[in-house]
Structures are given as C-alpha cells and as structure tokens.
Amino acid sequence: MNHQRYAIIGTGAVGGYYGARLAHAGREVNFLMRSDAAHVREHGLRVESVEGDFSIGPNDVRACDDAGAMPRCDVAVVALKTTSNGVLGDILPRVLTDAGVVVMLQNGLDIERPVAELLGAERVLGALAFVCANKVGPGHIKHLDYGMVKLGQYTADGSAGGVTEAVSRVGGDFEAAGIRVELSEDLTLARWQ
C-alpha cells in the first residue's frame, strides 16, 4: 500500500504526540523542530501515554530544524501556536508536494484562511484536537488523557465542505495510528461547537 508522507510543522505537545503516533504506526513522518532536532536525532522521540508508552528510536525518527532540508510531503500538519503562523508562507511551499494538503491542527476560528489564500481552499483541512498532553523535555511528550481529532474540509465561504477524499485519507491514517477520528461534514460548525 502506498502511504502518504507527513510533515509535522511544530513539534510541541500536540504535534509531537500526533506525529509520533503516525510514525509509530509506520507512516513516514518528518518533524520540523525549532530547538529539539539535534537532541531527537541523537536520542529519538519518546511518548509517555495513558494508552501505553512508546518511542521512536534515533535511527527511525526524521527530525529537521530547516524546512529546506525536509522531503516534499503529501500532508503537512500545522501544530504551531497560531501566533507563529506568519512563517507558513515560507515553510509550506517548501515541504508540500504540488498536490499536498495542509491540516491546520490549531485552536481558533478561521485560522485556515491565510493558508487557503496561499494554496487554495481545496488543499486545506481543519482539525480540532481534544487532547491533554505536555511537552516535558526535548523530544519527550507526556499524553495524559483524551486524544480524539475532528477533521473537516475548509471552504472559503464557510459552507459545509462534506467529507472529501483528502479528509478520508488523512482520517484513515490517523485511525490506523490508533487516534480516534470524527470526520466532519461542516468544519465551521465543528469549530463553533
């Protein structure tokens, strides 16, 4: 089976947890890290979880501190703090394939719009993470509870985008990684709820 290649943009508690789950399930995941890249390349990525601890060894983790060093990916999961979204205009074109999609795994309303203006609304998905996790050290995530993700297609006018092929593919990868996923017909409604 041909798997999608993932880029995790922002490897804090949320990006680190979901990215590690995807990598642990056998997906190719490339982590863009601000300060932890050297540590993770040497020691790997460790997750303490209420659902069972696991780690990704240094030979298996792909940690980069420069977007230009990352391979082109099919899916970029943005898990930065929204105050850092200004860097996405530089990062996303460098890490995405021509048909790649972006999953905005952040809190807030209408956070997808700037990325949609850059890449096109059809290439942007929104995700809501219901998770309690902390980054407790370099390359070390502690997952305390929950973990479900709501995933939906972004539309420029806020209308229901339905469950698109991209939403289904990303949702399937998350489910295969043991992440409970709810596919939303209406991302705007899901965010307001």
Image: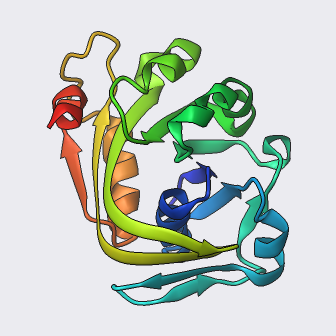
Residue 170 percent across, percent down from the top left: 40, 49
Residue 118 percent across, percent down from the top left: 58, 16
Please tell me whether residue 192 is drawn above or below residue 73 in the rendered image: above
Residue located 72% across and 79% down the image: 44
Res 80 quadrant in image: top right
Please tell me whether residue 169 is drawn above or below residue 15 in the rendered image: above
Q: Which quadrant: the C terminus? A: top left
- Closer-to-camera residue (121/129): 129
Residue 192 percent across, percent down from the top left: 18, 32
Residue located 75% across and 33% down the image: 94
Please tell me whether residue 85 is drawn above or below residue 128 in the rendered image: above
Please tell me whether residue 5 is drawn above or below residue 143 in the rendered image: above
Res 130 quadrant in image: bottom left
Residue 187 percent across, percent down from the top left: 24, 31
Residue located 28% across and 37% down the image: 152
On screen, residue 122 versus residue 92, left or right, reads left
On screen, residue 80 versus residue 58, left or right, reads left
